[in-house]
């Protein structure tokens, strides 16, 4: 039997705690280096990485551009969180929480900083009056599920994803706990999508953009290499909905922006114009 851990009276920071991100994790916030962020020519400057939270926002931008809204042109710069880019003074100025994505709207000379992915989605939806329902009941339904994603995904990513894919050792207790919760969440979503074409009903909204990069990609077997472990083929309605979203060109483009891993012909580390997708394979 393994030795039981007894918590100390006062916790202290141990840099050698292991795990994929142990070299950058600290119990304090703030900038670690003085470094300005790069800036492009477009109205919006996005500093991000092609993780699920980053993909939410790049899908939104690509959807706006797909509608012909040139005012939504954006520059997307890569933030390498493994190297600690999120702790530069420039990034912290936009997002004091040092998490991607972070957005700067130049706003005609009166810049506005926006952080937290759901906040960015709401900001852009309200600014351009797109992908947000006008009917109060439908809008409320959308908001319910948008905040469901915000509250639920940390159990999927920080819980299941961490202990299944990133922890230095595999431990039964946390894996059982977070696997059970992840499958419960998938079941909640699957049952909802049995009766709804999109998250808010018949209308495609920012709630779909927020939930898809986490739960849709997971159900399609492309997150944490955990498809067999989680038996994701059980969630037929999530897969149907995901396949529907993957017919949208903006979704296919958005999921590749700020990606710097995987097949080389499916990486767009930085995005400054539609020409950056030339030669890129968009198929899922």
Image (cartoon, rainbow, N blue to C red):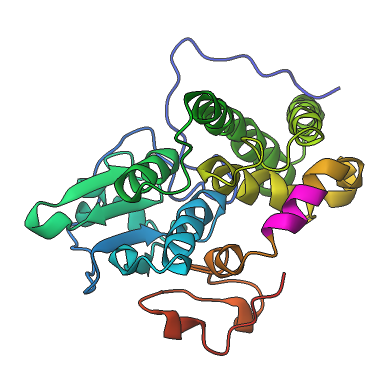
The answer to whether residue 116 of the structure is visible from this angle is: no
* Outermost bottom residue: 279
* Principal secondary structure, stretch drawn in magenta: helix
What range is drawn magenta here?
240-245
Q: Residue at x 53, y 68 (%)?
A: 259
Vertical placement of residue 223 versus 2, above or below: below
Q: Residue at x 80, y 55 (%)?
A: 221
Q: Residue at x 47, y 35 (%)?
A: 14
Which residue is nearer to you in this view: 104 or 180? Answer: 104
Q: Position of residue 47 (x, y in %)?
A: 34, 59
Q: Position of residue 30 (x, y in %)?
A: 25, 41
Q: Is residue 9 left or right of residue 200?
A: left
Q: Position of residue 207 (x, y in %)?
A: 55, 40
Q: Judge whether residue 147 is colored magenta.
A: no
Q: Position of residue 51 (x, y in %)?
A: 55, 55
Image quarter where the N terminus lies is top right
Which residue is nearer to you in this view: 251 or 266? Answer: 251
Q: Residue at x 55, y 66 (%)?
A: 250
Picture mark count? 0
Quarter assignment of residue 256: bottom right
Which residue is nearer to you in this view: 44 or 90? Answer: 44
Quarter assignment of residue 34: bottom left
* Outermost front residue: 135
The answer to whether residue 14 of the structure is visible from this angle is: yes
* Outermost top residue: 9
Which residue is nearer to you in this view: 24 or 51? Answer: 51
Q: Is residue 26 left or right of residue 194?
A: left
Vertical placement of residue 28 versus 215, above or below: above
Image quarter where the C terminus lies is bottom right
């Amino acid at each position: 039997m393994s030795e039981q851990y007894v918590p100390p009276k006062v916790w202290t920071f141990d840099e050698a705690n292991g795990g994929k991100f142990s070299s950058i994790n600290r119990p304090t916030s703030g900038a670690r280096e003085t470094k300005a962020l790069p800036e492009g020519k477009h109205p919006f400057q996005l500093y991000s990485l092609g993780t699920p939270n980053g993909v939410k926002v790049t899908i939104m931008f690509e959807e706006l551009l797909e509608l012909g809204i040139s005012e939504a042109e954006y520059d997307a710069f890569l933030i390498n969180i493994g190297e600690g880019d999120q702790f530069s003074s420039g990034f912290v100025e936009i997002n004091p929480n040092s998490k991607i994505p972070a957005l700067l709207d130049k706003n005609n000379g009166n810049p506005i900083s926006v952080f937290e992915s759901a906040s960015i989605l709401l900001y852009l939806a309200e600014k351009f009056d797109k992908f947000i329902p006008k009917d109060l009941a439908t809008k409320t339904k959308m908001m319910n599920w948008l905040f469901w994603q915000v509250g639920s995904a940390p159990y999927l990513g920080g819980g299941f994803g961490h202990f299944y894919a990133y922890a230095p050792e595999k431990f039964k207790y946390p894996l059982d706990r977070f696997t059970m919760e992840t499958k419960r969440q998938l079941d909640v979503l699957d049952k909802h999508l049995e009766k709804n074409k999109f998250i808010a009903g018949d209308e495609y909204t920012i709630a779909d953009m927020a939930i898809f990069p986490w739960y849709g990609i997971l159900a399609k077997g492309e997150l944490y290499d955990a498809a067999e472990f989680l038996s994701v083929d059980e969630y037929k309605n999530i897969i149907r909905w995901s396949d529907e979203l993957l017919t949208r060109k903006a979704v296919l483009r958005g999921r590749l922006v700020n990606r710097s891993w995987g097949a080389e012909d499916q990486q767009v580390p930085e995005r400054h114009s539609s020409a950056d997708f030339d030669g890129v394979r968009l198929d899922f």
